[in-house]
Image (spheres, rainbow, N blue to C red):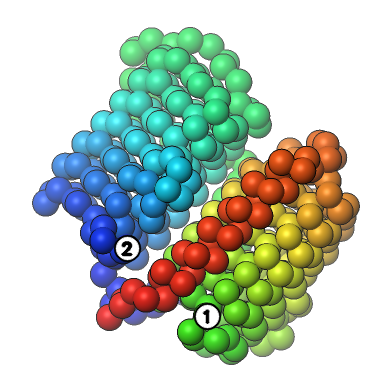
Amino acid sequence: MLEKKNNIHPRIKFLKYFPTIAKNVSISSSAKIIGNSNIKKNTKILDNVIIRGDGEKIEIGESCLFEKRSTVHVASDLLGTKIGNNCIIEQYAIIHACLIGNNVKVGENSVVMDGSTVGDYSIILADTLIPPGKKFDRFSLISGSPAKLIKNIDTSYYNKFNGLKSKSNFRFKEYLRKINLNLQSIKFDEDKTFIAPDALIGCSIIAKPNSSIWFSTVLHSPDNKGSVYLGSGSNIQDNSIFNTKGKDIHIGDRVTIGHNVIIDGKSRIDNNAVIGMGSILEENCIVEKNAFVGANSYVKTNTVVPEGKIYAGNPAKYFRDVSQQEKEFFSLGQKIYEKLTLEYLKNSYD
Protein backbone atom coordinates (compact mmCIF):
# COMPACT_ATOMS: atom_id res chain seq x y z
CA MET A 1 0.00 0.00 0.00
CA LEU A 2 2.86 2.36 0.80
CA GLU A 3 4.87 1.62 -2.32
CA LYS A 4 5.60 4.61 -4.47
CA LYS A 5 7.99 5.00 -7.37
CA ASN A 6 11.12 6.56 -5.95
CA ASN A 7 13.66 7.94 -8.40
CA ILE A 8 15.57 9.79 -5.69
CA HIS A 9 19.01 8.25 -5.22
CA PRO A 10 19.65 6.97 -1.66
CA ARG A 11 22.80 9.14 -1.48
CA ILE A 12 22.16 12.88 -1.28
CA LYS A 13 24.77 15.61 -1.29
CA PHE A 14 24.51 18.35 1.33
CA LEU A 15 26.53 21.51 0.79
CA LYS A 16 30.09 20.31 0.04
CA TYR A 17 29.55 16.87 1.55
CA PHE A 18 28.65 13.68 -0.31
CA PRO A 19 28.27 10.40 1.64
CA THR A 20 31.26 8.05 1.68
CA ILE A 21 30.00 4.48 1.49
CA ALA A 22 31.96 1.24 1.11
CA LYS A 23 31.23 -0.73 -2.07
CA ASN A 24 29.69 -3.72 -0.32
CA VAL A 25 27.16 -1.81 1.80
CA SER A 26 23.55 -2.84 1.10
CA ILE A 27 21.11 0.10 0.98
CA SER A 28 17.36 -0.05 0.35
CA SER A 29 16.17 2.24 -2.43
CA SER A 30 13.81 3.93 0.04
CA ALA A 31 16.60 4.73 2.53
CA LYS A 32 18.41 8.10 2.46
CA ILE A 33 22.09 8.65 3.26
CA ILE A 34 22.79 12.37 3.37
CA GLY A 35 25.78 14.66 3.46
CA ASN A 36 28.63 14.25 5.92
CA SER A 37 28.18 10.50 6.45
CA ASN A 38 30.76 7.69 6.30
CA ILE A 39 29.60 4.05 6.26
CA LYS A 40 32.04 1.13 6.32
CA LYS A 41 31.85 -2.29 4.70
CA ASN A 42 29.23 -5.02 5.16
CA THR A 43 26.64 -2.73 6.72
CA LYS A 44 22.99 -3.30 5.77
CA ILE A 45 20.44 -0.47 5.63
CA LEU A 46 16.77 -1.42 5.29
CA ASP A 47 13.63 0.42 4.11
CA ASN A 48 13.07 4.08 5.03
CA VAL A 49 16.20 4.36 7.16
CA ILE A 50 17.37 7.99 7.34
CA ILE A 51 21.04 8.78 8.01
CA ARG A 52 21.25 12.55 7.83
CA GLY A 53 24.68 14.13 8.18
CA ASP A 54 23.74 17.72 7.46
CA GLY A 55 26.19 19.21 9.95
CA GLU A 56 28.77 17.34 11.99
CA LYS A 57 29.88 13.92 10.77
CA ILE A 58 28.08 10.59 11.07
CA GLU A 59 30.50 7.64 11.24
CA ILE A 60 29.15 4.09 11.00
CA GLY A 61 31.39 1.06 11.40
CA GLU A 62 31.54 -2.33 9.72
CA SER A 63 28.84 -5.01 9.65
CA CYS A 64 26.04 -2.97 11.20
CA LEU A 65 22.30 -3.46 10.61
CA PHE A 66 19.78 -0.63 10.48
CA GLU A 67 16.21 -1.89 10.51
CA LYS A 68 13.15 -0.21 8.98
CA ARG A 69 12.47 3.45 9.75
CA SER A 70 15.39 3.87 12.12
CA THR A 71 16.84 7.39 12.10
CA VAL A 72 20.39 8.68 12.64
CA HIS A 73 21.03 12.41 12.90
CA VAL A 74 23.46 15.00 14.31
CA ALA A 75 23.11 18.16 16.37
CA SER A 76 23.75 20.62 13.57
CA ASP A 77 27.40 21.77 13.56
CA LEU A 78 27.69 21.13 17.28
CA LEU A 79 27.85 17.37 17.75
CA GLY A 80 28.19 14.39 15.42
CA THR A 81 27.27 10.72 15.73
CA LYS A 82 29.58 7.72 15.85
CA ILE A 83 28.41 4.09 15.73
CA GLY A 84 30.95 1.29 16.05
CA ASN A 85 31.25 -2.11 14.37
CA ASN A 86 28.68 -4.94 14.52
CA CYS A 87 25.84 -2.83 15.89
CA ILE A 88 22.13 -3.54 15.43
CA ILE A 89 19.73 -0.59 15.35
CA GLU A 90 16.24 -2.05 15.41
CA GLN A 91 13.16 -0.61 13.75
CA TYR A 92 11.96 2.89 14.60
CA ALA A 93 14.94 3.54 16.89
CA ILE A 94 16.63 6.97 16.91
CA ILE A 95 20.36 7.61 17.29
CA HIS A 96 20.95 11.34 17.74
CA ALA A 97 24.32 13.09 18.15
CA CYS A 98 25.82 10.44 20.42
CA LEU A 99 28.53 7.75 20.67
CA ILE A 100 27.64 4.07 20.29
CA GLY A 101 30.46 1.57 20.82
CA ASN A 102 31.16 -1.76 19.10
CA ASN A 103 28.71 -4.67 19.37
CA VAL A 104 25.79 -2.63 20.71
CA LYS A 105 22.16 -3.60 20.19
CA VAL A 106 19.58 -0.80 20.26
CA GLY A 107 16.07 -2.17 20.72
CA GLU A 108 12.91 -1.19 18.85
CA ASN A 109 11.48 2.28 19.44
CA SER A 110 14.41 3.34 21.61
CA VAL A 111 15.97 6.82 21.60
CA VAL A 112 19.61 7.65 22.33
CA MET A 113 20.00 11.41 22.72
CA ASP A 114 22.66 14.08 22.32
CA GLY A 115 26.01 13.66 24.04
CA SER A 116 25.24 10.18 25.39
CA THR A 117 27.76 7.33 25.32
CA VAL A 118 26.99 3.60 25.22
CA GLY A 119 29.96 1.28 25.69
CA ASP A 120 30.89 -1.89 23.81
CA TYR A 121 28.84 -5.09 24.17
CA SER A 122 25.84 -3.28 25.62
CA ILE A 123 22.15 -3.97 25.05
CA ILE A 124 19.49 -1.26 25.03
CA LEU A 125 16.11 -2.88 25.53
CA ALA A 126 13.03 -1.86 23.52
CA ASP A 127 11.22 1.42 24.33
CA THR A 128 14.21 2.85 26.21
CA LEU A 129 15.05 6.57 26.38
CA ILE A 130 18.68 7.51 27.03
CA PRO A 131 18.61 11.23 27.92
CA PRO A 132 21.22 13.77 26.82
CA GLY A 133 24.69 13.35 28.30
CA LYS A 134 24.05 9.96 29.90
CA LYS A 135 26.99 7.52 29.92
CA PHE A 136 26.89 3.73 30.16
CA ASP A 137 30.02 1.60 30.47
CA ARG A 138 30.83 -1.54 28.48
CA PHE A 139 28.72 -4.65 29.11
CA SER A 140 25.60 -2.75 30.23
CA LEU A 141 22.00 -3.97 30.03
CA ILE A 142 19.98 -0.76 29.75
CA SER A 143 16.24 -0.14 30.04
CA GLY A 144 13.65 2.42 31.09
CA SER A 145 12.51 5.94 30.35
CA PRO A 146 14.75 7.53 31.50
CA ALA A 147 17.26 4.74 31.02
CA LYS A 148 18.91 2.95 33.92
CA LEU A 149 21.51 0.22 34.22
CA ILE A 150 19.65 -3.03 34.84
CA LYS A 151 22.77 -5.09 35.34
CA ASN A 152 26.26 -5.74 34.04
CA ILE A 153 26.54 -8.52 31.48
CA ASP A 154 29.31 -10.51 29.78
CA THR A 155 30.01 -11.62 26.21
CA SER A 156 28.11 -14.87 26.72
CA TYR A 157 24.95 -13.01 27.76
CA TYR A 158 25.38 -10.51 24.95
CA ASN A 159 25.82 -13.17 22.28
CA LYS A 160 22.78 -15.10 23.48
CA PHE A 161 20.54 -12.02 23.66
CA ASN A 162 21.84 -10.51 20.43
CA GLY A 163 20.22 -13.26 18.38
CA LEU A 164 16.76 -12.52 19.79
CA LYS A 165 14.23 -10.00 18.48
CA SER A 166 13.34 -7.29 20.99
CA LYS A 167 9.69 -7.00 21.96
CA SER A 168 8.43 -3.44 21.94
CA ASN A 169 5.04 -2.44 23.29
CA PHE A 170 4.77 -0.25 20.20
CA ARG A 171 4.33 -1.14 16.51
CA PHE A 172 4.71 1.73 14.06
CA LYS A 173 3.06 -0.31 11.28
CA GLU A 174 -0.28 -0.05 13.09
CA TYR A 175 -0.29 3.66 12.23
CA LEU A 176 0.19 3.02 8.51
CA ARG A 177 -3.10 1.22 7.85
CA LYS A 178 -5.90 2.36 5.51
CA ILE A 179 -3.79 4.89 3.66
CA ASN A 180 -5.19 6.40 0.47
CA LEU A 181 -2.24 7.99 -1.31
CA ASN A 182 -4.51 9.09 -4.16
CA LEU A 183 -5.82 11.86 -1.91
CA GLN A 184 -3.30 14.70 -2.07
CA SER A 185 -3.76 18.46 -1.99
CA ILE A 186 -0.67 20.49 -1.09
CA LYS A 187 -0.61 24.28 -0.87
CA PHE A 188 2.82 25.79 -0.19
CA ASP A 189 5.40 28.28 -1.44
CA GLU A 190 7.93 26.19 -3.38
CA ASP A 191 10.66 28.79 -2.85
CA LYS A 192 10.27 28.94 0.93
CA THR A 193 8.98 25.53 2.03
CA PHE A 194 10.89 22.24 1.90
CA ILE A 195 8.92 19.03 1.41
CA ALA A 196 11.18 15.99 1.04
CA PRO A 197 10.66 14.30 -2.33
CA ASP A 198 10.05 10.92 -0.71
CA ALA A 199 7.37 12.13 1.72
CA LEU A 200 4.19 10.05 1.38
CA ILE A 201 1.22 12.41 1.48
CA GLY A 202 -2.38 11.27 1.34
CA CYS A 203 -4.32 14.21 2.78
CA SER A 204 -4.76 17.94 2.34
CA ILE A 205 -1.82 20.06 3.50
CA ILE A 206 -1.32 23.78 3.89
CA ALA A 207 2.34 24.58 4.66
CA LYS A 208 3.36 28.15 5.42
CA PRO A 209 6.72 29.79 4.50
CA ASN A 210 9.94 28.54 6.11
CA SER A 211 8.26 25.31 7.18
CA SER A 212 9.56 21.84 6.32
CA ILE A 213 8.47 18.20 6.00
CA TRP A 214 11.44 15.84 6.10
CA PHE A 215 12.49 12.50 4.67
CA SER A 216 10.37 9.37 4.89
CA THR A 217 7.49 11.16 6.62
CA VAL A 218 3.95 9.86 6.12
CA LEU A 219 0.96 12.23 6.36
CA HIS A 220 -2.31 10.57 5.52
CA SER A 221 -6.01 10.11 6.04
CA PRO A 222 -8.21 7.02 5.61
CA ASP A 223 -10.79 9.18 3.78
CA ASN A 224 -10.95 12.44 1.81
CA LYS A 225 -11.60 14.75 4.75
CA GLY A 226 -8.39 14.89 6.78
CA SER A 227 -6.00 17.85 6.68
CA VAL A 228 -2.70 19.08 8.13
CA TYR A 229 -1.95 22.76 8.68
CA LEU A 230 1.75 23.52 9.19
CA GLY A 231 2.53 27.01 10.44
CA SER A 232 5.34 29.35 9.48
CA GLY A 233 8.80 28.14 10.50
CA SER A 234 7.54 24.78 11.79
CA ASN A 235 9.06 21.40 10.95
CA ILE A 236 8.00 17.76 10.81
CA GLN A 237 11.15 15.67 11.05
CA ASP A 238 12.18 12.40 9.41
CA ASN A 239 10.10 9.22 9.75
CA SER A 240 7.22 10.95 11.54
CA ILE A 241 3.74 9.56 10.84
CA PHE A 242 0.53 11.59 10.95
CA ASN A 243 -2.88 9.92 10.57
CA THR A 244 -5.57 12.60 10.52
CA LYS A 245 -8.35 10.02 10.89
CA GLY A 246 -10.42 12.31 8.67
CA LYS A 247 -10.02 15.29 11.04
CA ASP A 248 -7.64 18.28 11.28
CA ILE A 249 -4.13 18.34 12.69
CA HIS A 250 -3.20 21.97 13.34
CA ILE A 251 0.44 22.90 13.96
CA GLY A 252 1.15 26.52 14.83
CA ASP A 253 4.16 28.70 14.06
CA ARG A 254 7.75 27.80 14.96
CA VAL A 255 6.80 24.32 16.19
CA THR A 256 9.32 21.47 16.21
CA ILE A 257 8.02 17.94 15.64
CA GLY A 258 10.98 15.61 16.28
CA HIS A 259 12.10 12.51 14.40
CA ASN A 260 9.79 9.45 14.45
CA VAL A 261 6.87 11.23 16.11
CA ILE A 262 3.39 9.80 15.62
CA ILE A 263 0.24 11.94 15.76
CA ASP A 264 -2.80 9.70 15.58
CA GLY A 265 -5.89 11.78 14.98
CA LYS A 266 -7.13 15.31 15.54
CA SER A 267 -4.60 17.42 17.46
CA ARG A 268 -3.56 21.02 18.04
CA ILE A 269 0.05 22.05 18.62
CA ASP A 270 0.34 25.76 19.41
CA ASN A 271 3.11 28.26 18.63
CA ASN A 272 6.69 27.56 19.80
CA ALA A 273 5.82 24.12 21.17
CA VAL A 274 8.16 21.11 20.87
CA ILE A 275 7.18 17.46 20.45
CA GLY A 276 10.23 15.39 21.39
CA MET A 277 11.55 12.69 19.08
CA GLY A 278 9.93 9.27 19.26
CA SER A 279 6.75 10.53 20.97
CA ILE A 280 3.18 9.42 20.26
CA LEU A 281 0.12 11.66 20.55
CA GLU A 282 -3.31 10.06 20.54
CA GLU A 283 -6.32 11.94 19.17
CA ASN A 284 -7.78 15.13 20.63
CA CYS A 285 -4.54 16.22 22.28
CA ILE A 286 -3.67 19.90 22.73
CA VAL A 287 -0.14 21.15 23.33
CA GLU A 288 -0.31 24.83 24.24
CA LYS A 289 2.24 27.48 23.27
CA ASN A 290 5.78 27.16 24.62
CA ALA A 291 4.97 23.69 25.99
CA PHE A 292 7.19 20.64 25.54
CA VAL A 293 6.47 16.93 25.21
CA GLY A 294 9.56 14.97 26.25
CA ALA A 295 11.23 12.48 23.92
CA ASN A 296 9.70 8.99 23.70
CA SER A 297 6.57 10.05 25.59
CA TYR A 298 3.07 8.64 25.11
CA VAL A 299 0.38 11.34 25.27
CA LYS A 300 -3.04 9.82 25.87
CA THR A 301 -6.32 10.88 24.28
CA ASN A 302 -7.71 14.28 25.37
CA THR A 303 -4.52 15.32 27.17
CA VAL A 304 -3.90 19.08 27.41
CA VAL A 305 -0.26 20.10 27.92
CA PRO A 306 -0.52 23.59 29.46
CA GLU A 307 1.48 26.60 28.32
CA GLY A 308 5.11 26.53 29.43
CA LYS A 309 4.94 23.03 30.94
CA ILE A 310 6.91 19.85 30.19
CA TYR A 311 4.99 16.59 30.00
CA ALA A 312 6.91 13.30 29.78
CA GLY A 313 6.59 9.55 30.28
CA ASN A 314 4.09 6.82 29.44
CA PRO A 315 1.47 8.03 29.95
CA ALA A 316 2.80 11.57 29.68
CA LYS A 317 2.17 13.73 32.75
CA TYR A 318 3.46 16.95 34.27
CA PHE A 319 7.22 16.81 34.78
CA ARG A 320 8.18 20.44 35.45
CA ASP A 321 8.02 23.94 33.97
CA VAL A 322 10.05 24.88 30.90
CA SER A 323 13.05 26.97 31.98
CA GLN A 324 14.12 30.17 30.24
CA GLN A 325 17.32 28.43 29.13
CA GLU A 326 15.27 25.64 27.55
CA LYS A 327 13.04 28.15 25.75
CA GLU A 328 16.14 29.70 24.22
CA PHE A 329 17.57 26.28 23.31
CA PHE A 330 14.34 25.15 21.65
CA SER A 331 14.15 28.42 19.74
CA LEU A 332 17.72 27.88 18.50
CA GLY A 333 16.80 24.39 17.27
CA GLN A 334 13.79 25.73 15.41
CA LYS A 335 15.91 28.43 13.76
CA ILE A 336 18.44 25.77 12.70
CA TYR A 337 15.63 23.99 10.86
CA GLU A 338 14.64 27.19 9.10
CA LYS A 339 18.25 27.49 7.93
CA LEU A 340 18.28 23.84 6.83
CA THR A 341 15.06 24.45 4.91
CA LEU A 342 16.73 27.11 2.78
CA GLU A 343 19.84 24.99 2.24
CA TYR A 344 17.87 21.92 1.15
CA LEU A 345 15.79 24.00 -1.24
CA LYS A 346 19.00 24.68 -3.17
CA ASN A 347 19.65 20.94 -3.67
CA SER A 348 18.62 19.04 -6.79
CA TYR A 349 16.94 15.65 -6.34
CA ASP A 350 16.59 14.70 -9.99
Left or right side of 248 for 347? left
What is the count of numbered marks?
A: 2
Left or right side of 248 for 84? left
44 or 309: nearer the eye?
A: 309
For the residue labelled by badge 1, is the local secondary structure a helix, a strand or a loop?
Answer: loop
The mark nearer the N terminus, 1 or 2, is: 2
Which numbered circle lies on residue 125? none
209 or 282: nearer the eye?
A: 209
7 or 59: nearer the eye?
A: 59
Give yes or no for contact between labels 1 and 2 (Cβ–Cβ under 8 Å).
no
Q: Quadrant of residue 47?
A: bottom left
Instruction: Assess disc 2: are there few (<14), some (14-19) or many (≥20) residues with their C-alpha within 10 Å of its C-alpha.
Output: many
Q: Which residue is mark 2?
A: 14
State the CA–CA distance, disc 1 to disc 2.
18 Å
Q: Which residue is mark 1?
A: 192
Q: Quadrant of residue 40?
A: top left
Left or right side of 123 for 110? right
Q: Amino acid at mark 1?
A: Lys
- From the top left corner, tell me how far across and down residue 305 is, in percent: 84, 52
Q: Amino acid at mark 2?
A: Phe
- From the top left corner, tell me how far across and down residue 4 is, in percent: 39, 77
Left or right side of 49 for 17? left
Q: Residue at x 30, y 52 (%)?
A: 36
Q: Quadrant of the C terminus?
A: bottom left
Please determine whether, in this image, residue 192 is positioned above or below residue 96: below
- From the top left corner, tell me how far across and down residue 45 is, in percent: 30, 51
Q: Quadrant of residue 252?
A: bottom right
328 or 174: nearer the eye?
A: 328
- From the top left corner, tell me how far across and down residue 311 is, in percent: 79, 43
Please determine whether, in this image, residue 141 is positioned above or below residue 231: above
Q: Residue at x 48, y 84 (%)?
A: 191
Report whether residue 79 is seen: yes
